[in-house]
Amino acid sequence: MAIIWIILVVILLLFLAFLGFSAFVAYKMTKPERFVGDWTPKDLGFDYENVEFTTEEGLKLRGWWIEGGSDKTVLPLHGYTRSRWDDVYMKQTTEFLLNEGYNVLAFDFRGHGESEGKYTTVGEKELLDVKAAVKWLMENHPEKARRVALVGFSMGAVVTIRSLAEIEGVCCGVADSPPIYLDRTGARGLRYFASLPEGLYNFVKPFTKLFSGAKELNMVEYADRVRKPLLLIAGEKDPLVKVEEVREFYERNRSVNGNVELWVTDAPHVRTLKLHPEEWKRKVGEFLGRFL
């Protein structure tokens, strides 16, 4: 009997250790290290203003307001773990948009960069961040916000799609590498970022929801809700988001949205701009030229 009790205690301890490890992984996922760089729009040749605005829950978000001499404004939206200082796609996108003559409002999502917020919800509560940004723009620069567009990457692409359905002031958007099935992308992320088995995600997920307070987000349903112009970009070498998943969203959205487009490239996650900068700028520039 003593042996049986010892075995049971060992099993219980191992189970508790496993749960503890799962909780630790979830904590690290919902509270990523903040990325703050040292470049500013001044380095791109543009004057800018440091701005701060508040979400409806009271979180202060920080960013840059950069006037491009237009009555049209674009918000570039960064991905998970990044910020407005990202130099893989945010810096290039900001420069491109300004050179195209648009105003730019770039900011850090909650829990990222210099914005407040302990946790990220990877696209769920971040919709409130875009709402706060658009509200600030409309109240402070209404003459510069006759038309407002979004260009989002990864998590920012999720929020772009949601904003097209839920924020009246947004007229069109570009979604580069958008996770459509967030659980699948989350599981792949464990393997890609931490070399952990994808199956661990089933145990990690409840803790991520507990820490962040995020609600379940079903991106597929937005394929039935988005009616505004949308350019989807997917990469064949993307280890986190499969082209087939983005294509499924596109085909479903196309039945209700005559202005949805899909561009498939050979790039990894959010790397089309880096690998094919001129083609990306041409495609996105033409899209914005038509609908913004």
Image (cartoon, rainbow, N blue to C red):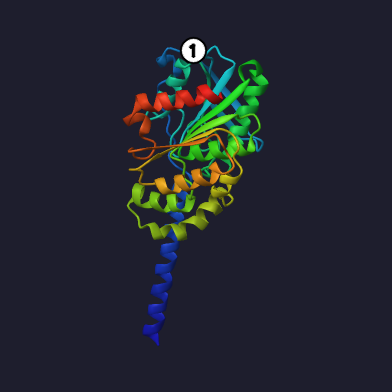
Up the image or down, 120 lies above or below 167; here it is below
Q: Residue at x 57, y 39 (%)?
A: 257
Which residue is situated farthest in the bottom direction here?
1
Q: Residue at x 47, y 33 (%)?
A: 78
Query: Which of the 4 image quadrants contains residue 233?
Result: top left
Q: Which residue is mark 1?
A: 47
Asked whether the viewer can see residue 147, the reply is yes
Q: Position of residue 136 (x, y in %)?
A: 63, 25
Would residue 70 be found to the left or right of residue 44 on screen?
right
The kind of residue tagged 1 is: Asp
* Label 1: which secondary element: loop
Q: Position of residue 84 (x, y in %)?
A: 46, 28
Q: Residue at x 40, y 73 (%)?
A: 11
Q: Nearer the viewer, residue 203 or 123?
A: 123
Up the image or down, 255 lies above or below 289; here it is below
Q: Position of residue 19 (x, y in %)?
A: 45, 62
